[in-house]
Image (spheres, helix red, strand yellow):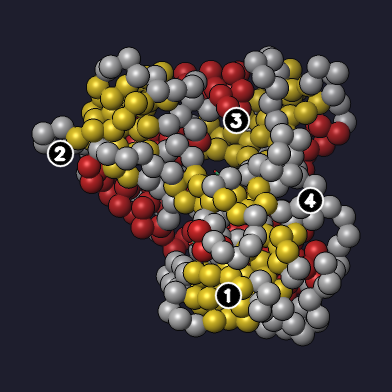
Amino acid sequence: MTPVPADGRIVIVGGSIAAATAARSLRNRGHAGQVTLISSEDHPPYARPPLSKAVLTGTDVPESAYLPELEGVELLLGVPAVGLDSAARTVALADGREVGYDGLVIATGARARTLPGGGDRVYTLRDLGDAQELGQLMRQGARLLVVGGGPLGMEVASVGRELGTEVTLVSDTPPMEALLGAHLSGLLVEAATAAGVEIIRQPVSELQQDQAGRPVAVLHDGRRVDGDVAFVAIGCQPNVEWLAGSGLAAGPRGLEVDEYLRVAPGIVAAGDVVAFPAESGCRRTPYWQSAFDQAVTAVEVLLGSGDAPHLPRPYFWTEQFGHHVKLVGSVVGDDAPEEVPAAAGTVLRWRNSDGAPVGAAGIDCPLSITKLRKLLASA
Ligand SMILES: Cc1cc2nc3c(=O)[nH]c(=O)nc-3n(C[C@H](O)[C@H](O)[C@H](O)COP(=O)(O)OP(=O)(O)OC[C@H]3O[C@@H](n4cnc5c(N)ncnc54)[C@H](O)[C@@H]3O)c2cc1C
């Protein structure tokens, strides 16, 4: 890719960690040209992880999620990009404006997937408004029906119990198992159950509404489970619709990039929107650290200051039911991890069939990501 000239205009479309990191990296690398960040949200770029944690409990005010201010960056807020002409190098905005660029970073992330039906008391959680609304309902004591046993479903269930709400969680697989493996899933399910969450292991066939307007989950085995409100946490889908007709390889599985995060001449992408090449085809890794790391690489590639392909270094954390879990690398199937001696908390390590370490987790322990990563290198 021909590098963007030192005084070239770089446009970033997106309003969260990938976009903000790209903007900051451009300035840190001394890029002298104009940098414009376009976000469909009215808020300045903010972090999403607190939305299912301290912002949801109400412990922290919404503004505490704002990312550090971006100096020397033009912010166009509350105006979605609706089209891209990659030949003319222009981004079309919903208000009719066209913004030209020399280099473009696509960081439009993802939005919550949901289920049809269930009426108007079915919620998802993706932005600050969602967190405020859901938090308020839980603080008012609304009985919560959670659909989905991934990190978001479990974190919201945890906050619900913290706020004294009755919580039933329905999940087709053991909660957290897909991400953290059977061992840690067991630990977190035990903690959730001890905290008073009723966990039902069943797929949800559909959402309906009862006569009082309450959402009801109809389970695969025919059972019906209701709540005053339902919270659906069944993953996220990439925001790629605005790229329709642009000729870029964007679809329901994300925006395809190469291993340098390049999309087309003058265009790179980062974050939850990205489908990155993997052995099994292009895959999204919709986690915070991945969005951050990709944004840093994408900017290096755009400026021509880096020539190495992006190296994914998986890291994920979650806070739920009194536990703080950090994972670097990945867990292996159902294999029991080995325990690594630690000064505080628990540290676990997984090995593949060749005995090579592939994942390390810290549970309620202050070990930094760097130190956890060293456990993978030094075993
Ligand atoms: C509630 C919650 C809690 C989470 N907790 C954790 C956690 O504990 N640990 C972890 O690792 N990960 C967590 N995640 C995931 C993590 O937050 C995401 O991976 C990260 O936000 C991805 O950043 P992103 O910038 O790629 O995309 P997003 O955060 O999705 O941001 C995309 C931005 O682009 C904007 N946008 C979209 N379309 C357009 C358009 N057409 N024009 C202009 N702007 C547009 C959106 O409005 C949004 O501002 C959590 C996510 C959520 C929702």
Q: Label 3 belongs to which residue? A: 179
Q: Quadrant of residue 127?
A: bottom left
**Up-down: is 273 above or below 224?**
below
Above or below, comparing residue 127 to residue 278 in the picture: below
Give the mark nearer the N terminus: 1 vs 4: 1
Q: x, y (%) of residue 342? A: 73, 27
Element assignment for label 3: helix
Residue corresponding to mark 4: 259
Look at discs 2 and 1 and give the one toward the viewer.
1
Label 2, label 1: how far apart the Cα atoms are: 43 Å
Q: Earlier in the sequence, mark 3 or mark 4?
A: 3
Q: Secondary structure at mark 4?
A: loop
Mark sitting earlier along the chain (4/2): 2
Please, is residue 157 above or below residue 52 in the view?
above
Q: Is residue 23 visible?
A: no
Q: Which mark is residue 213?
A: 2
Q: Residue at x 71, y 74 (%)?
A: 103
Q: Position of residue 204 (x, y in %)?
A: 36, 26
